[in-house]
Image: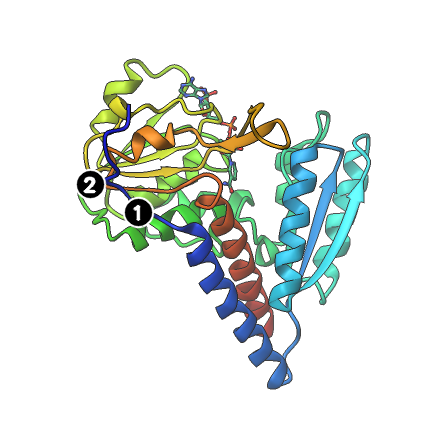
Amino acid sequence: MVTKTTATILDGVAIANEIRAGMAEKVAARLTVGKTRPGLAAVLVGNDPASHVYVKMKRKACEKAGIQSFYHELPADTPQAELEALVAKLNADPAVNGILVQLPLPKGLDEERVLQAIDIRKDVDGFHPLNIGRLAQKGRKPLFLPATPAGVMLLLERSGVKLEGANAVVLGRSNIVGMPVALLLIEANATVTVCHSRTKDLKNVCAAADVLVAAVGRPEMVRNDWIKPGAVVIDVGVNRIDDPESEKGTRLVGDVAYDEALGVAGAITPVPGGVGPMTIAMLLSNTLRAAELADG
Ligand code: NDP
C-alpha cells in the first residue's frame, strides 16, 4: 500500500551523464596535448544474452566518451589457455588501457585464473585478486574499484547520507557486488551487516538499516516494512519479470518493491535508471585512470 511519496529519487542517469560528459572532456583534453586515446578491450565468452546487452552498452558508452573500444567475442567452449593467451596479448598491447572480461564466464572456465592473468594496471573492473585483496585490507588502496560498488558509493555520496557510524545492511555477498560494497562501506566507517541466503530474520535486520543496499537478484523482495523510515535504499538488482501490459511482455524491476518503498525511504534508486548507468560511468572513469597510469 502506498500512502505518499517521501523518498528523494536518486537519479543515476543524470549523475552518470554528468560523469560521462566530464570523461569526454578529459579524453578530448588528452588528445589536444598529444596524449594517447584511452582504449578499453571487452572480452565476451559465450552466449549469455544479458552479458551481450551489457557489453554492447559499455562499448557504446566508450565510443561516446571518445574511448577506443576493442571487442573480442569467443565461443562458450573456448579453452582456458586460449582465453588466457588473449588476456596476455591485451596486456601487451599499448593501445589497450583497460581489459574487461565480462562475467560470469561459461562453466568450465576458471574465472579466478583469468582475472589473475589481467595486468593489475589494466584491471578496470577491479576484480583482480590483488585489487580485491587491497580493498579488504585497512589502509591499503586498490588501483581500481569495481564499477558497480563504486557507483553505489557515489550514489550514497550524492544522497548526502552520513556514512560514518551509520548502520548499513548489504543484502547479498557476491564477489561482484555485495562483498566489495560491504568493504567500501566499512572503509567509509559505517557499521556493516552482510546478509545472504542463510541469514535469519532478514526483514528485521534490514529494517534496522540507515543504509540498505540490495543486491540479491530477487524481484521486489524488499517490501516497505523491511525499510526503516527515512533510510537510504540503493537497489542494485536487475530482474526481468513478466508484464502482459508492456509491449515486450516483460519489464525490469529491482530487488526492492519500488512503489512501496517510495512511501517510507528517505532516498531510493529506481530500476532501471539507478545503479546501472553508474556502473558504466565508473567503468569509463577507471579506463581513463588506466590511461593516466600508462602515461607514467
Ligand atoms: P549473485 O547471484 O552472485 O549473488 C546474490 C546474493 O544474494 C548471494 O550472496 C545470495 O546468498 C544472496 N541471496 C540470494 N537469494 C537470497 C534470499 N532469498 N535471501 C537472502 N539472500 C539471498 O548476484 P550478483 O551479486 O551478481 O547480482 C545481484 C543483483 O544485482 C542481480 O539482480 C544482478 O542482475 C544485479 N546486478 C546489477 C548490476 C548493475 O550494474 N546494476 C551489476 C551487477 C549485478 P548466498 O551467497 O548465500 O548464495
Residue 55 in sight from this viewpoint: yes
The residue that disc 2 covers is 166
The residue that disc 1 covers is 187
Q: Position of residue 212 (x, y in %)?
A: 30, 34
Label 1 Cα neighbours within 10 Å, binned few <14 / some 14-19 / many ≥20: some
Does residue 185 appear to the left or right of 111 in the view shown?
left
The quadrant in which residue 198 appears is top left
Q: Position of residue 52 (x, y in %)?
A: 70, 40
Element under label 2? loop
Q: Is residue 162 placed above or below 208 in the rendered structure?
A: below
The residue lying at 70 percent from left, 57 percent from top is 91
Q: Position of residue 220 (x, y in %)?
A: 42, 25
Q: Is residue 286 placed above or below 21 in the rendered structure?
A: above
Residue 118 in sight from this viewpoint: no
User: The C terminus appears in which quarter of the rendering?
Assistant: bottom right
Q: Front-most of 115 and 281?
A: 281
Q: Amino acid at mark 1?
A: Glu
